[in-house]
Amino acid sequence: MSRNITNRRMYDWNAVPWRKLERAVFKLQKRIYRATQKGDKRLVRRLQGLMTRSWSAKMIAVRQVTQQNRGKKTAGIDGIIALKPSERQPLVRQLRVEKGKKVNPTRRVWIPKPGRKEKRPLGIPTMYDRALQGVVKMALEPEWEAVYETNSYGFRRPRGCHDAIEAIFKSIRNKPKWVLDADIAKCFDKIDHKALLKKLNNSSPIRKVIRGWLKAGVMDRGLFQATEAGTPQGGVISPLLANIALHGMETTVMGVVPKTINEQSKLTVVRYADDFVVMHENREVIEQARKVVQEWLSEIGLELKAEKTHISHTLDGEKPGFDFLGFNVRQYKVGKHRSGKNTNGQPLGFKTLIKPSQKAIERHKEKLQNVVKKP
């Protein structure tokens, strides 16, 4: 895109060539990704700085937070909601990743958890901070995509919960296994800031800006509260920061088995955001993995949620199977005619079925009732 075209269309939001801007950002992200794979940190930092100054990245970030995101009409403490086209260009020109810039606190919003009486706290940043977080996310995401662990699925494009379920199926389809089904207690609210910033390993202005967002505090019903830990849910960059904080769990768990291809292939860790499962045919390995995970989480200020952490078997026991991401994963003993088969075509004596969990079915029924009864 020439300089003349850019200047001519700078104030006509509806005529912006978004596909060209997206291609420009994607090309720069590919360069960051490849530089990370090569281990060239100096080049990575230079390219990330280029991304944070990119007009294309700023335009896309502003478009995302003012037009596309579901929370575009939820205001921060600035009271600003979805901007008009004429107001978006001035916001683009204001975006700067600078050291020492004062960050406004987030606005606390409480939303109900599905199927429970307790509420989840959200921290809604100002419109400016949301847009700037979008730019920083574009710069950081490709660097971490190059190093993320294999079975990490939450908040990663184009991965989703069905990919996590498929990984579980592939792990257990030929042999029943013991499963550690675990959940991290208040993951977004308790992540240790020092541990997270240390993991970022970034001395550029990006680190200073992220530290400012983490320490900005919240306004809850007109009262200011300092934030000593956690990443505010509701921010554009929060899911990325949570994934960065939890990166390394799979590698740590793999250390409980001997470092041989045969042994490590038997152990599988599948993580979706703060929910994860560990699978192995030996219960002792699962018990050991639980201890290792608890110790590893304590280093970043987190802990397992006792009431949501269980060890079960996919085939045997009083309550075989487990629920994960709204699905029930279980194996059933069947005859040879209905049995699953291994790669050689031999019957296994059981069949692996993955169905919607009972809680997910009840939630869906409740939604249908609300729709039907709505006047």
Image: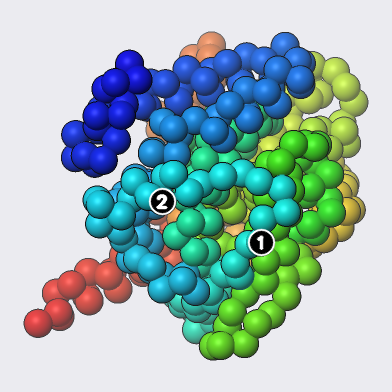
Q: State the residue in front, 86 or 251.
A: 86
| Residue 111 locus on image (x, y percent) | 46, 76
Q: Label 1 sits on what residue type?
A: Lys
| Residue 163 locus on image (x, y percent) | 48, 35
- Asked where in the image residue 186 lies, by quadrant, the reply is bottom right
Q: Is residue 119 left or right of residue 359?
A: right
SS of the residue at dot 1? loop
Look at the image and name its color scheme.
Answer: rainbow
Residue under circle 1?
Answer: 102
Q: Is residue 311 left or right of residue 50?
A: right
Q: Residue at x 59, y 79 (%)?
A: 219
Q: Which quadrant would the N terminus be assigned to in this image?
A: top left
SS of the residue at dot 2? helix
Lower sequence index among marks 2 and 1: 2
Q: Label 2 sits on what residue type?
A: Leu
Furthest toward the left, the residue is 375
| Mark sitting on residue 91 | 2
Q: Residue at x 68, y 23 (%)?
A: 46
Q: State the residue in front, 30 or 302.
A: 30
23 vs 269: above or below: above
| Mark sitting on residue 306 | none
Q: Residue at x 56, y 88 (%)?
A: 222
Q: State the residue in front, 207 or 201.
A: 207
